[in-house]
Amino acid sequence: MIKIKTVSEIEIMRQGGQILAQVLEHLISISVVGTSADLLNDLAEKIILQFGGQPSFKGFNGYPYSICVSTNREIVHGLPLTNKIFKAGDLVSIDVGLLYKGFHTDAAKSFIIGQPQSKNDVKLIKITESSLMKAVEAIRDGVLLGEISHLVENYVTKNGFKIVKNLSGHGIGEDLQEDPPVFNFGRKNQGPRLKKGMVLAIEPMVVAGSPINFTLADGWTVATRDGKKAAHFEHTVAVLEKGRQILTR
């Protein structure tokens, strides 16, 4: 069942999303060679609590941390461990969720530590972010969700990369993950029709090589089977009467 949000509920999510955006940008700003992922986790939780929120991820399905930090071949759900220390050229993805006044928001960004190892790493990040923004720009009342999904896949594949198809975005609100699933692939004429008041967490997950992946022994981290790099971008977006609003910026 897809939950429709009121104007006041979307405003609460916008407020939470602004806090989340500040947290995420701060984490990125202090991520340099030698930074450990657990430092980012602890700092994120501290800031979120100071703003009167709660970390959405902590305890969700038993997840023990407040953020996800994925590096290089890791696609999503990377654990922010003490021994995960950033090196020059690492491709890092940080994913953060925030519960504020009863509503969740969710956002993620990928970036490179120091100088990139290859032009393809830079392109991978650029295309993944661009695919998210193209999806956001296409959101409006009355559009079939499949249109958005198809647009993302078509753009990514045209630029030489692959979509991870066994992972998806989702609706979001009072629950961190709500209906509908938001796939990054599909046909134009499929999926539910977007309506004013729907809020979606749109999150393309894109890989440089094969999209075949597996979960590491830690039980959480999803990584590419071939070891090629991955990128991940996400925004929480509300469907408005005319157009859309990114809540996490």
Image (cartoon, rainbow, N blue to C red):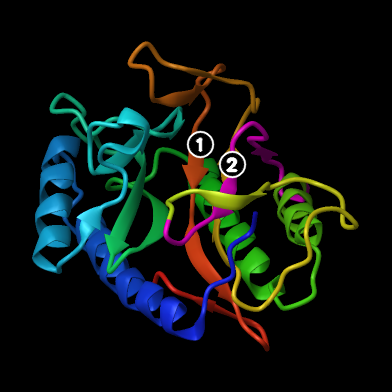
Whether the residues at callouts 2 and 1 have beta carbons within 8 Å, the answer is yes
Q: Is residue 172 visible?
A: yes
Q: Position of residue 233 (x, y in %)?
A: 49, 53
Task: Determine if the magenta segment contains residue 225.
Answer: no
- Numbered circle sitting on residue 206: 2
Could you tell me which quadrant the N terminus lies in?
bottom right
Determine whether, in the image, residue 135 is placed left or right of residue 248.
right
Q: Residue furthest front?
A: 1
Q: Position of residue 21 (x, y in %)?
A: 32, 67
Residue closest to the eye, 171 or 164: 171
Could you tell me which quadrant the C terminus lies in?
bottom left
Residue density around tag 1, few if under 14, some if 14–19, many if 20 or more, within 10 Å: many
Q: Amino acid at mark 1?
A: Ala
Q: Amino acid at mark 2?
A: Val
Q: Give the dominant element type of the magenta stretch: helix, strand or loop.
A: loop
Determine whether, in the image, residue 50 is placed left or right of residue 74.
left
- Numbered circle sitting on residue 230: 1
Q: CA distance from mark 2 to mark 1?
A: 6 Å
Residue drawn at 23 percent across, 43 percent down: 66
Residue drawn at 15 percent across, 51 percent down: 45
Q: Is residue 115 placed above or below 52 in the rendered structure?
A: above
Which contiguous range is marked in magenta? Answer: 158-174
Residue drawn at 14 percent across, 41 percent down: 35
Determine whether, in the image, residue 149 is placed left or right of residue 58.
right
Residue density around tag 2, few if under 14, some if 14–19, many if 20 or more, within 10 Å: many
Q: Position of residue 33 (x, y in %)?
A: 18, 41
Residue closest to the eye, 118 or 224: 224
